[in-house]
Amino acid sequence: MKIFYIIRSELDETIRKIIERQYRGNEVKVLELSAGDLSYESIIEDIFTHDRVISW
């Protein structure tokens, strides 16, 4: 399963642990919105090409 995480706030330990567990047997991509220099076209493409999108 392809999982796309969109992190809106600071990545805390609980969120980090949940994401780490998802790496087992899945393709996981994490986007931190606070990172800046974002390509909205790329974000939209990722939303539609992943099986599951989770926003924190």
Image: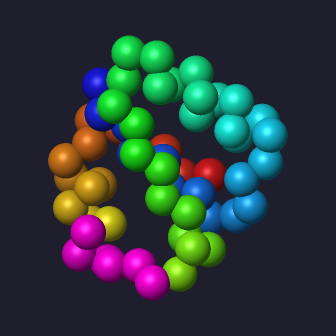
Q: Residue, x 78% and y 36% (percent of image)?
A: 14
Q: Quadrant of the N terminus?
A: top left
Q: Position of residue 24 (x, y in %)?
A: 46, 17
> Which residues are the magenta region?
37-42
Vertically, is 26 above or below 25?
A: below
Q: Residue, x 26% and y 69% (percent of image)?
A: 42
| Way the structure is coloured | rainbow
Q: Position of residue 15 (x, y in %)?
A: 70, 40
Vertically, is 44 above or below 56?
A: below
Q: Is residue 7 left or right of residue 2?
A: right
Residue 5 lies in the magenta stretch: no
Residue 40 lies in the magenta stretch: yes
Tell which residue pokes out farthest to the bottom in this image.
37
Q: Position of residue 29 (x, y in %)?
A: 40, 45
Quarter residue 17 falls in: top right
Quarter residue 43 falls in: bottom left
Q: Position of residue 36 (x, y in %)?
A: 53, 81
Tell which residue pokes out farthest to the right in this image.
13
Q: Residue, x 45% and y 84% (percent of image)?
A: 37
Q: How many marks?
A: 0
Q: Residue, x 72% and y 53% (percent of image)?
A: 11
Q: Is residue 40 left or right of residue 20?
A: left
Vertically, is 6 above or below 53?
A: below
